[in-house]
Amino acid sequence: MLAGLGRLIHRRRWTSLVLILIMTVLAGGWGLGVFAKFKQGGFEDPKASSTLVAKLGATYFGSTNPDVLVVYSSDTTTVDDPRYMASVVTTVSRLPKDRVAEIISYWSFDAEDAAPFASHDKRRTFVALKLAGTDAEKGLHYEEIKDRLQAPGLTTQLGGAVPLNIEFGEQVVSDIVKAEIISMPILLILLVVVFGALTASVLPLIVALFSIVGGLAVLHVVTYVTDVTSMALEVVTMMGVGLAIDYSLFIVSRFREELERGMRAGGIEPGKPWKRAPDRRQRRAEKKAYRRALRPVQQAALARTMATAGRTIAVSGITVSAALGGLLVFPQMFLRTIGLAGIATVLVAVFGAVVLLPTMLALLGTRVEAGRMPWRRHTSKRARRDPDSGFWYRLGHSVMKRPLPYFAVTLVILGVLFGPFLNVQFGSVDARVLPKESPTRAVVELVKEEFPNGSAEPIDVVVSGDLIPRDWKPVRSGDNIPPYLEEFRTRLSEMPGVTQAKFTGYSGSYGGVRISITHKYEPLDQRALDLVTGIRAMSLTKNGFPMHIDVGGSTAAQMDLMDALMRSLPKMAALVCLTTFLLLFMFFGSVVLPLKAIVMNVLSIGASFGVIVWGFQYGHLAGLLDFTPTGSVEATSMILILAVVFGLSMDYEVFLLSRIREEWDKTHDNRAAVAVGMQQTGGIITSAALLFLIVIGAFSMAGLTVVKLIGVGMFVAVVVDAALVRSLLVPATMRFMGGANWWLPPALAGLHAKMDLRERDDLPGVAANVAPPRLPDEQPYPYAMRWEQPAPAPAPAAAPAPTPLPPPRSNGASASPAFADYQEAALPNITFQSAAPPNTVSQQFSSSSEGPGSAPGDPTYPPTSVDPSMPPSATDPQTPWTPWANGQPQPRPTRTTRTKREIVPNPSGSGWRWRTVEDNDAY
């Protein structure tokens, strides 16, 4: 199917380009609207008790986390000074009531209750504002009033939830712009080095830009279905650029390889040979003939690229999407929307690699080599001279010669990297994820350091039920407190570590009351966790009817988050592993290789997790990356890294094993297949990993600590995967397992034959290296074939006269070299299958050349069929016809007839052999 898509794109390349340009412009305009739709947060479990308490506080009781926190400071006066009060109260009282729903300040309470609103030296105070409207409207209202919060004679600092969310979103955009400015020039330079040509090096960047634009457009559509976190923008950019460059690298490299092979087989001289013609008329004629001869070669090269590398990229994209799809099983908005954003970006990157990039290659053709660098010319000559002596080929043979030392050393290194993860401590996202110079973060840290109870994060307990009094106000003096509620509050205040428990909210319409508990522990201290557990184990009844007790606050929210992650993680692992196994089984035709690939990816993930704990929890990377260590790592970010790294590692696994499988199908030699597969993909995978590292490294320098953590985790995983797992561990394990790598139970062989996704080399109209067909009495596919040598046959009788071929079909168009000519010239002694049009007959032919397959009874020469329109030489069937030679277009030679050899059963009943003349009477 992809080969047909490649031929279609080549025929309709200009139409395809115009449609893609229109689609890109429309997607770009639509995608820009996503910036106004982002939401903040999304780390909580929507069904958790702590989430319910937070929603009740925002709806009925009043949020303990103000929308805007305004800190006023003075160097000369204190909050008790009337001038201080007049400046603050006058400023906040002028705020529009349709924008600000509630104002709470130091002067809103009695002296005892107002103490938390003044700093220890009473030179600072804060005012808590609750804005009106929805979350989106609160952001707009804040932008309208923030300039009106400056109090005369005082220093003003703004913080709170709304400014924090706004700064977080702005920092995301700033990080992306910074990363692109840093990475793009470096990527262009490295692409020139890798491709050795200026034109080829620009193509991946075009696909990357298309992937970002398309990803944002799809993400905008997702915002109409569910909330989307602004962190999704980082994922879209990071994965869009990284995967687009990876995929483009494989497509362009394979196309150049196929194009060079086709031109070499057809005798087409690269460059501009017509310029050597003596006059303009002859140059024009030779140029026209050259381009006519080159057109079928380019089309066939693109078709074969799509059928091999294009198929691998499609499978890889589906595999990466399946890994990111595991994030959809989690209830947290943060993970679900990033999963959707990642899947959208991967699919757009695949579309760009298999549609946009082939369109550009079809338009460029041989001009993809424009701006060729000197080292590209030398590398091509060296590769043609000795293709099996490269570094990766030698490394593969070295690993398989001594697999045990390589295997042991690699596992030791991976174990050392994984070690710190055994002491992991999970935490939550707070203001410390922002840069140190962040004004919003400065307000949070100032309140914690300078104000009483500033560092205390209370535990909120909501008691609800139909028996809650409807007309009772616990925060109003003179109201009688119901005895059962007062008794429950007393029980809470007597728990270990609790310093105070008081009523802080009441709702008669909801039927609930809130009790806020302050304690002397850090929010994530084990004693604070035990305190929440103890509160949730308590019960309260009235008149024999139980009351509902819900516990919230940062400590309870972190516990609920971890519980939700632990419940969903096994589901994610089962879904991702099962989907990956099925996809790789369909692609590789083996039961062992998918299992091995999953294990290898887990090793890469474990190494990256260990480095994250070492660098961020322990703080060893704080100086290098300029962040504040918190003694913990954010749990949802680790889940995100798990999904993304698993997909990326499987990406490289598919690229490597696809070439190894291709060589195995040709040779059925496990060691040779691994060595050749590593040689053919080692340089490309290493280049792709290096380019991806540039993208990730740029995001590792972002301002948000969460983005730094994700970048470092992915960076380490890619390095470990490319340098250790794919280069050393995979060949070592494949050497250990030998033929078992390709084991496929007979019961699954038929199933795999119906769903085979392997790369195809036997394309219609394309020369191919095809392994000998499996005989009926051999072991089931995919084991190596064991050919039975037939007994010596008597001298054959004279062959009958060949039957003349019918004339080729003609549509009246001018004659041009058919690509079947390229087939014959490329590999005259190798089996290939050609698509036969309705007026084509299959001819039997036999080889007249010497060497393997030329002698009667030699089992190495397989049956072959050929399109009779292919014009072999009239004088020598093995002499290839070249459409261009010695600077001149060559005429078509005449056609001859060839015969085909057949495999028949041995007369004894055991085994098979080639048909001989004596078999004509029996069959």
Image: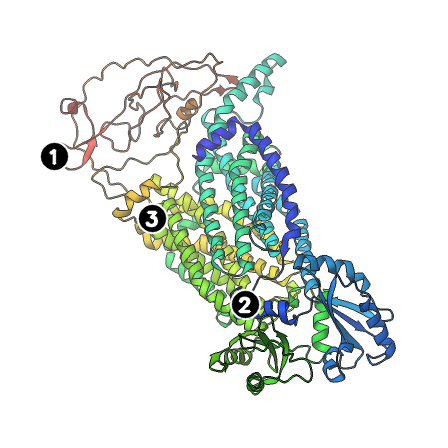
Q: Which of pointers 1 and 3 indicates the residue nearer the eye?
A: 3
Mark 2 residue type: Val
Quadrant containing the N terminus is top left
Residue 366 in view (yes/no) = no
Mark 3 residue type: Ser
Give the CA separation, mark 1 to mark 2.
Answer: 69 Å
Cβ–Cβ under 8 Å for marks 1 and 2:
no
Residue under label 3: 590
Q: If you read the primary sequence from the N terminus, does the residue marked by circle 1 or circle 2 appear first?
A: 2
Residue under label 2: 613
Residue 436 in the figure: left or right of residue 639? right
Residue 298 in the figure: left or right of residue 477? left
Residue under label 1: 908
- Which residue is found at the position 42% from the left and 43% from the top? 659
- Which residue is found at the position 41% from the left and 24% from the top? 825
Q: Quadrant of residue 408?
A: bottom left
Q: Residues within 10 Å of mark 3 (few under 14, many from 20)?
A: many
Q: Residues within 10 Å of mark 2 (few under 14, many from 20)?
A: many
Mark 1 residue type: Ser
